[in-house]
Image: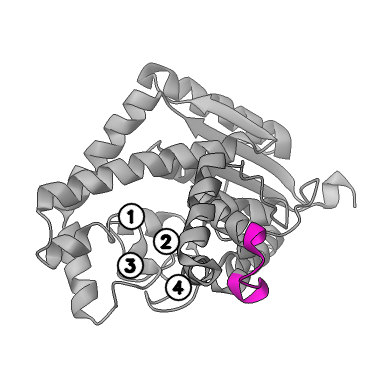
């Protein structure tokens, strides 16, 4: 297949709170684009504030996809995302428009850009030793049960006596937040005519933005959003309810911790999540990186990104 025959795709990635949404809206408007959410949590209805969905008027201004397509108690997986996103990319291209995947869930995005996934999670000797001690003290069945709690598919495939592989599966989960069952072989080259834009920022400034955004979410009604989900019967153990901003507020609503403690936990865990996001993205190739730390340089960065897209697709922006 020649380059001209390959379907076009723009991907905008980066850690949470770095500014992906605003950039994507501007680019999609000027390049006749449609946005595919690359966020594993924005698929859930009724989970708007904590997942940082675009505002309703923003969603209405540009066609958006894979947002509000599941109830919080419905299954969603990287395989489902991959299938849906690939179909949308083809449809958007066939209509002569430009598809943008925008988000921070690296596994989901790379499953599309390179069709398959593989684990490159580094080894953690300290974690492996701790898990081995657990197997020695409580038995291999206890270790296997722990894996079954977080990755039942892999646990079903592995015998409890296969301690080495059980430990590796738990190591992958605890190091990356992803399940071994999510990982498959990765295509060496993307099947798309691809432009990948990565946004980064000085860590101190990014963490400041994360802390502030969490405060704004609380002011916007995140506590009430979580309370409403619980009142609607959505169990705290659901995958959706384990998302950042939801998991931490549930103990507060149950009277177990203070609101200040819950907010601090959200901020801390979101900062850790941003660090993991960057670690994932940094190993991905083909990314044009832009540092958004200096607000005075942001406009220049946006103009550079526009020139990259115009040159890649021989398309002038809609001014």
Q: CA distance from mark 2 to mark 1?
A: 9 Å
Q: Which residues are magenta?
A: 155-165
From the top left corner, tell me how far across and down residue 234 is, in percent. 29, 78
Q: Which residue is mark 2?
A: 41
Numbered mark located on residue 69 in the image: 4
Q: In the image shown, does 261 or 168 lie closer to the viewer? A: 168
Q: CA distance from mark 1 to mark 4?
A: 19 Å
The residue shown at (90%, 52%) is: 1
* Pair 4/3: label in front: 3
Q: CA distance from mark 3 to mark 1?
A: 8 Å
Check disc 2 and report its element: helix, strand or loop.
Answer: loop
Between discs 2 and 3, the one toward the N terminus: 2
Q: Which residue is mark 1?
A: 244
Q: CA distance from mark 4 to mark 3?
A: 16 Å
Numbered mark located on residue 241 in the image: 3
From the top left corner, tell me how far across and down residue 284 is, in percent. 65, 38
Q: In the image shown, does 101 or 116 lie closer to the viewer? A: 116
Judged left or right of residue 20, residue 32 is right
**Structural crowding at the residue carrying mark 1, measured as other residues with C-alpha within 10 Å and reported as few (<14), some (14–19) or many (≥20):** some
* Pair 2/3: label in front: 3
Q: In the image shown, does 222 or 35 lie closer to the viewer? A: 222
**Structural crowding at the residue carrying mark 4, measured as other residues with C-alpha within 10 Å and reported as few (<14), some (14–19) or many (≥20):** few
* Pair 2/4: label in front: 2
Disc 3 to disc 1: CB gap under 8 Å: no
Disc 4 to disc 3: CB gap under 8 Å: no
The residue shown at (51%, 24%) is: 301
**Structural crowding at the residue carrying mark 2, measured as other residues with C-alpha within 10 Å and reported as few (<14), some (14–19) or many (≥20):** many
Is residue 251 part of the magenta span, yes or no? no
The residue shown at (19%, 73%) is: 228
Disc 2 to disc 1: CB gap under 8 Å: yes
Is residue 163 part of the magenta span, yes or no? yes
């Amino acid at each position: 297949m020649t380059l001209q025959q390959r379907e076009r795709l723009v991907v905008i990635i980066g850690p949470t709170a770095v500014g992906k949404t605003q950039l994507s809206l501007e680019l999609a408007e000027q390049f006749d684009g449609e946005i595919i959410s690359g966020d594993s949590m924005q698929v859930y209805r009724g989970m708007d504030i904590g997942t940082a969905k675009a505002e309703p008027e923003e969603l209405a201004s540009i066609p958006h996809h894979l947002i509000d397509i599941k109830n919080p108690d419905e299954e969603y997986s990287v395989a489902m995302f991959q299938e849906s996103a690939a179909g949308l990319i083809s449809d958007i291209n066939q209509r002569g428009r430009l598809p943008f995947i925008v988000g921070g869930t690296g596994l989901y995005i790379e499953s599309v850009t390179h069709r398959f996934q593989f684990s490159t999670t580094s080894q953690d000797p300290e974690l492996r030793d701790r898990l081995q001690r657990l197997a020695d003290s409580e038995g291999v069945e206890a270790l296997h049960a722990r894996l079954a709690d977080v990755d039942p598919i892999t646990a079903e495939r592995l015998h409890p006596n296969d301690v080495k592989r059980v430990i590796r599966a738990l190591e992958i989960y605890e190091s990356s937040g992803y399940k071994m069952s999510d990982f498959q072989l990765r295509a060496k080259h993307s099947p798309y005519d691809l432009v990948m834009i990565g946004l980064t920022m000085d860590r101190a400034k990014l963490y400041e933005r994360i802390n502030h955004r969490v405060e704004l979410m609380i002011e916007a009604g995140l506590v009430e959003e979580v309370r409403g989900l619980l009142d609607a019967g959505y169990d705290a153990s659901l995958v959706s309810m384990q998302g950042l901003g939801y998991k931490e507020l549930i103990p507060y609503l149950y009277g177990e911790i203070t609101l200040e403690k819950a907010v601090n936990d959200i901020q801390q865990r979101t900062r850790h999540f941003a660090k993991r996001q960057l670690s994932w993205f940094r190993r991905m190739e083909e990314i044009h990186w832009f540092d958004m730390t200096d607000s005075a340089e942001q406009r220049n960065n946006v103009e550079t990104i526009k020139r990259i897209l115009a040159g890649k697709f021989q398309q002038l922006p809609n001014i």
